[in-house]
Image (cartoon, rainbow, N blue to C red):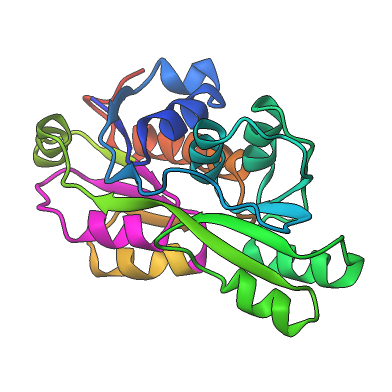
Amino acid sequence: MLTLLLTRPRAASERFSATLPRSVLSRVTTVNSPLIRIVKTADDIDFGDARGLIFSSSNGVAIASALSPSRDLPCFCVGEATAKAARQAGWQADCVGATSDALVSALSQNRPETPLLHIRGTHSRGHIVARLTAQQCPARAQVVYEQCLVPLTEQAEQALAGPGAVIAPLFSPRTARQFANQPKGQAPLYLAALSKAVATPLKTLTCKELAIAEHPDSATMAALVERLVNTAIRVEGNGMAQ
């Protein structure tokens, strides 16, 4: 049996799973085993004199939505999925880049009204605030949640210990490191990494394939998962879901 192992927080995993073709989902057993648990650490949002918000993940959108009813400020987001989540929560939101680098470049060039407030978790990549401020685009950050590492579930461990192939898409370097540090069994591994940075911790593992997305977005990762499912079925042969 072929297992699709999803390691993001459940809501994010369910959104990603919903983008996969039915032809993929019908051939796998989907196992949700979040390696990160989102824990709220703030009681309110300190908007201060902010003239716009930055969201670099949908987790920040979810926490901010719960903490404040205010939707007055424009939002600048990393990734279309984050922008969509912000729009669904009631903000006027635009995706201004698929990565933090792209966001910093776009905001530095287009110069929105400032200062900007980056609502984020304890662990955040890209040094968005420092880089924007250095480009004369003043910004500050407020940490509103912690990303706590958690181990694989028993169901995930059983899948990794069994003979069937496991396909696991990984979306962040921290999650990838946590996955690489978990006990592994005999299951053939087919891993999809959002970027080279995500792939780096996974190179310590023995994999049938470690594929890196050409573009750091959900659509590209979904296509990559579909390809890995087809590859696993072809390579592993007997016992794979058809």
Q: Quadrant of residue 2?
A: top left
The percent coordinates of residue 222 (x first, y second) are: 54, 37
The percent coordinates of residue 16 (x first, y second) are: 50, 32
| Residue 154 shown left or right of residue 141 in the figure | left
The percent coordinates of residue 54 (x first, y second) are: 67, 54
**Relative to 134, does residue 16 appear above or below in the rendering?**
above
The furthest residue to the right = 110
Q: Quadrant of residue 101?
A: bottom right
Q: Residue at x 34, y 61 (%)?
A: 174
**Relative to 231, does residue 53 appear above or below in the rendering?**
below
- Whether the magenta-drawn stretch holds residue 3 is answered as no
| Residue 190 shown left or right of residue 56 in the figure | left
Most foreground residue, 71 or 221: 71
How many numbered marks have been drawn onto this rendered protein structure? 0
- What segment is highlighted magenta in the picture? 168-196
The percent coordinates of residue 45 (x first, y second) are: 55, 47
- Whether the magenta-drawn stretch holds residue 191 is answered as yes
Most foreground residue, 73 or 101: 73
Quadrant for the N terminus in the image = top left
Most foreground residue, 99 or 23: 99
Q: Residue at x 60, y 54 (%)?
A: 216
Quadrant for the C terminus in the image = top left
Q: Residue at x 32, y 68 (%)?
A: 201
The furthest residue to the bottom = 134
**Relative to 1, does residue 228 appear above or below in the rendering?**
below
| Residue 142 shown left or right of residue 186 in the figure | right
